[in-house]
Image (spheres, rainbow, N blue to C red):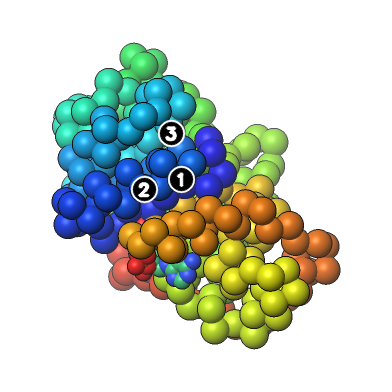
Amino acid sequence: MPMLGLGTYGMDDYDECVEAVTTAIEMGYRHVDTAEGYDNEDAVGDAIAEADVEREDLFVATKVSPDNLDYDHVLTSAEESLERLGLDYLDLLYVHWPTGEYEPLDTLQAFAELREEGVIEEIGVSNFEPEQLAEAVEVSEEPVFANQVEMHPLLRQTELQSVCAQEEVDVELVAYSPIARGDVDDVAELQDIAEAHDATPAQVSLAWLREKGVTAIPKAASRDHLRENWLSLAVELDDEDVETIDAIDDEERIVDPDRAPWNQ
Ligand code: NAP
């Protein structure tokens, strides 16, 4: 899985989405994150179809919405996503939230079958807390590859990081809202580190995630943001920078619906 991807939440204008995904792929991005709930899989698919890149060189991830998580609905949802994306397999299919129709055995059995049939390469979950993750790993017949959660220097997910690294869990973390929707710009520690590296706080945040071994999927519609985020791959933090970020006092969670498992 390429460690820097493009998020597409909020790109519900067809032309804007095609333009952003096309520009990103031309720039070098090879991982695109969407969801059936984002209402843009057709635009993402059209951009991929037009791109001058082999299908197997791209990593395409989408998500099944909470309303579609019973066994039959998962199978239908995956088929419909593939059709909208114009693809014959998905690199990664996530359970978007452990809510709604989510029922671990039933839901993950459908995901396992999709993987066995080659419809999806990997099984993902999203917004899973350590308890839901442990349960999913235990009941799933196929490996759980990734857990996509909000993560950035203001929400460091230390417990999930250590749980995911355990040998018996072994799940990749994917960070959504990795620049806290731009709020990292206002954090003094990040501004100082950025200045020392001739970088920006957003780039420092993405470099920090990379240091943690976490994949990041910043969303950017504008060419300038796409380029700035891509160039974060050249920012190398040292141990002291990482320690400074690990010690930031402020905490902020952006995506926080009532149904979230951490609010139960
Ligand atoms: P984000 O990537 O942290 O922030 C996106 C916002 O920051 C946009 O307004 C973007 O502006 C701006 N931006 C992008 N690059 C910037 C830069 N270098 N400097 C300053 N501002 C910059 O937040 P997100 O969209 O919430 O998260 C990213 C992706 O994660 C989503 O698109 C989606 O794919 C995924 N996600 C998943 C879940 C889930 O439940 N699994 C939840 C939320 C998000 P422009 O667009 O104008 O360039």
Q: Amino acid at mark 3?
A: Phe
State which quadrant residue 16 falls in. Answer: bottom left
Closer-to-camera residue (247/215): 215
Q: Is residue 74 above or below residue 233?
A: above
Amino acid type at mark 2: Thr
In this view of the protein, which residue sits in the foreground, 210 or 174? 210
Residue with the mark numbered 1: 27
User: Is 32 displayed left or right of 149 in the figure?
Assistant: left
Write down which quadrant ligand 1 falls in.
Answer: bottom left
Nearer to us: label 3 or label 2: 2
Viewer can see residue 79: yes
Counting other residues with Cα less than 10 Å from the Cα at mark 1, is it few (<14), some (14-19), or many (20 or more)?
A: few
Horizontal and vertical percent position of residue 197: 72, 68
Which residue carries the number 3 mark?
Answer: 59
Q: Residue at 55% across / 68% down in the picture?
A: 202
Q: Mark 1 to mark 3: distance in Å?
A: 15 Å
* In front: label 1 or label 3: 1
In terms of image quadrants, where is residue 198?
bottom right
- Residue at 46% from the left image edge and 74% from the top image edge: 182
* Res. 114 visible in picture: no
Q: Is mark 3 within 8 Å of ligand 1?
A: no
**Residue flagged by tag 1: what amino acid is it?**
Met
Q: Position of residue 66 (x, y in %)?
A: 25, 49
Badge 1 vs badge 2, beta-carbon distance below 8 Å? yes
Residue at 75% in and 74% down: 196
Q: Position of residue 199 (x, y in %)?
A: 64, 69
Residue carrying label 2: 23
Real-space Cα separation, disc 3 to disc 2, in angstroms: 16 Å
Contact? badges 3 and 2 (CB < 8 Å): no
Q: Position of residue 104 (x, y in %)?
A: 37, 39
The Cα atoms of the two marked residues, 1 and 2, are separated by: 6 Å
